[in-house]
Amino acid sequence: MQQAFLFHKLGRSWRKSPDKQIDASYLEVLHLFGDDEDSPYSIHNLLQAGSTYGLAPGSWVGPYAMCRTWESLVRNKREEIGNGISSSMIAVYVVSGDEDGERGGAPVLCIEDISRLCSKSSGGQSDWAPILLMVPLVLGLEKINPRYLPLLSATFTFPQSLGLLGGKPGASTYIVGVQDEKAFYLDPHDVQQDHTFLINRLGIRKDNTNSAVVTGNATYLVYLMFDFNTTDLVAHVKTDDLDADTSSYHCNVLRHMPLESIDSSLAIGFYCRNKSDFDDFCSRASELIDQSNGAPLFTVAESRSNPASYRSTAKDDAICTQDFDPADKLPTGGSENFTQDDEWQLL
């Protein structure tokens, strides 16, 4: 999610440099995800939005529930009056087969639904709002089905790719790339101190030296020593502090694991900046569907009422022009190619 906002505000080619002054737009993105209830996309607000999907402190939830939670949170923040967050113009769409996500089958990306959502999310400032597409998938039972591995690898070649939300059983990670048979990932689970908990919840205050903090109640007095001027409050970055230390917001170690060992429950992310970028994504997705041998990661449809797959090549159009018998749905043209000995497999 945060990566989508970075692409939205700074572009895909942007890189954080230790030798250059921090970009104000970068700080705006960090502030959106600050560890405070006032930050729109904080963990506090995420938990509240995800209560419907079983999201609670200390709980484990799957990618589908997580994607739906982000969708709900972004929609709620967009609908709030006077929130003053122009970055919330990003729309979020979860690609799924049905509303409860439990009927099986390949998820369906509906172009008509996305067009309507992007138009509504633009706030009248444009015809099309940037959109984050989330595709939650279950690609196997105990482990991922090997037939899907080439398709997953291919999604990283899309210019709209944001990577995978996944990992190994019991270990959630952010998979950012693949090479050969390896998946490269970042592990964001790094517990850090947040002294603002003491300040806000225990009534701690500065003393007249600005370096000692004193609090107390009827039964005890606590005296804590740390410097307000130097203590790193990692959870709160001010948007105007261009000298802020933001290293705690990033992973410094890139790890890898065998691609075949990733959990079968995962979610793919894509960011489309505008309508032409989305059209390019649909074209690439359709090509990937053609390469799936009947088992695509997801499908693309023009509308709910017309579930026929989105097509963009002359070859596809030629295939669709064959004569079909409505009785058995098999091509009648070129019947010599079909014999009694043909083998069929139910997928």
Image (tube, rainbow, N blue to C red):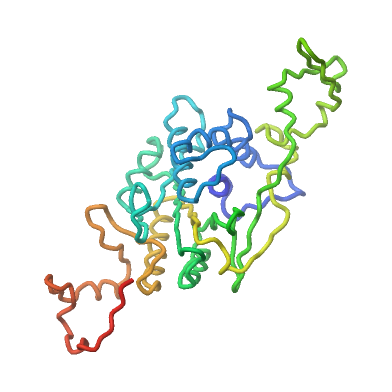
Is residue 34 placed above or below 312 in the rendered structure? above
Q: Is residue 312 left or right of residue 68?
A: left
Q: Quadrant of the C terminus?
A: bottom left
Question: In which quarter of the view is residue 283 placed?
Answer: bottom left
Name which residue lies at 63% across and 63% down. Answer: 184
Question: In which quarter of the view is residue 78 placed?
Answer: top left
Name which residue lies at 41% across and 68% down. Answer: 288
Residue 8, percent from left and from top: 53, 46
Residue at the extreme top of the image, as rendered: 218
Name which residue lies at 77% across and 49% down. Answer: 19
The mark total stands at: 0
Q: Between 304 and 346, which is closer to the camera in this rendering? A: 346
Residue 83, percent from left and from top: 50, 27
Residue 342, percent from left and from top: 25, 86
Q: Between 183 and 126, which is closer to the camera in this rendering? A: 183
Is residue 161 placed above or below 217 in the rendered structure? below
Question: In which quarter of the view is residue 206 placed?
Answer: top right
Residue 119, percent from left and from top: 35, 42
Q: Is residue 193 left or right of residue 93?
A: right
Q: Is residue 208 left or right of residue 21?
A: right
